[in-house]
Image (spheres, helix red, strand yellow):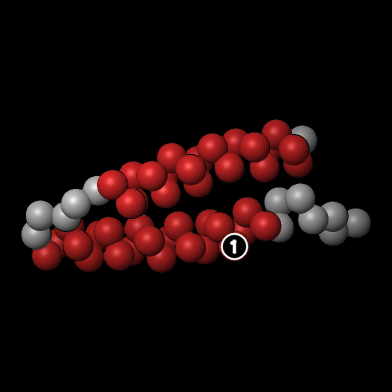
Amino acid sequence: MRIATGLLMTLWLLYVGLKFVTTVPVDYDAEIRRNYGGLILFFEVIAWTFVFERFA
């Protein structure tokens, strides 16, 4: 189950990362949302490293 979760999260991070890199904000509010999205993406990448770690 951890492998499936890790693979799904990998696909999600690739998709969101691509959207983050290719999106061009057009106003101040869009720039703020993009910065918040980058922060969330950063924390998701950190969380992704713990998907495969065993806690038992």
**Residue in view at x 53 percent, y 57 percent:** 44
Closer to the camera in the image, 28 or 19: 19
- Counting from the top left corner in percent of width and height, residue 39 is at 41, 65
Write down the quadrant of residue 53 in the picture: bottom right
Instruction: Give left or right: position of 26 versus 33.
Output: left
Write down the quadrant of residue 41 in the picture: bottom left
Q: Amino acid at mark 1?
A: Ile
Closer to the camera in the image, 31 or 55: 31
Task: From the image, tell me which residue sits under label 1.
Answer: 46
- Counting from the top left corner in percent of width and height, residue 24 is at 19, 51
**Residue in view at x 61 percent, y 59 percent:** 47
SS at badge 1: helix
Other-residue count near label 1 (Cα within 10 Å), few / some / many at <14 / 14–19 / ≥20:
few
- Counting from the top left corner in percent of width and height, residue 32 is at 22, 65
Instruction: Give left or right: position of 9 versus 21.
Output: right
**Residue in view at x 33 percent, y 64 percent:** 36
Determine whether 15 is above or below 30 in the image: above
Closer to the camera in the image, 56 or 32: 32
Q: Quadrant of the N terminus?
A: top right
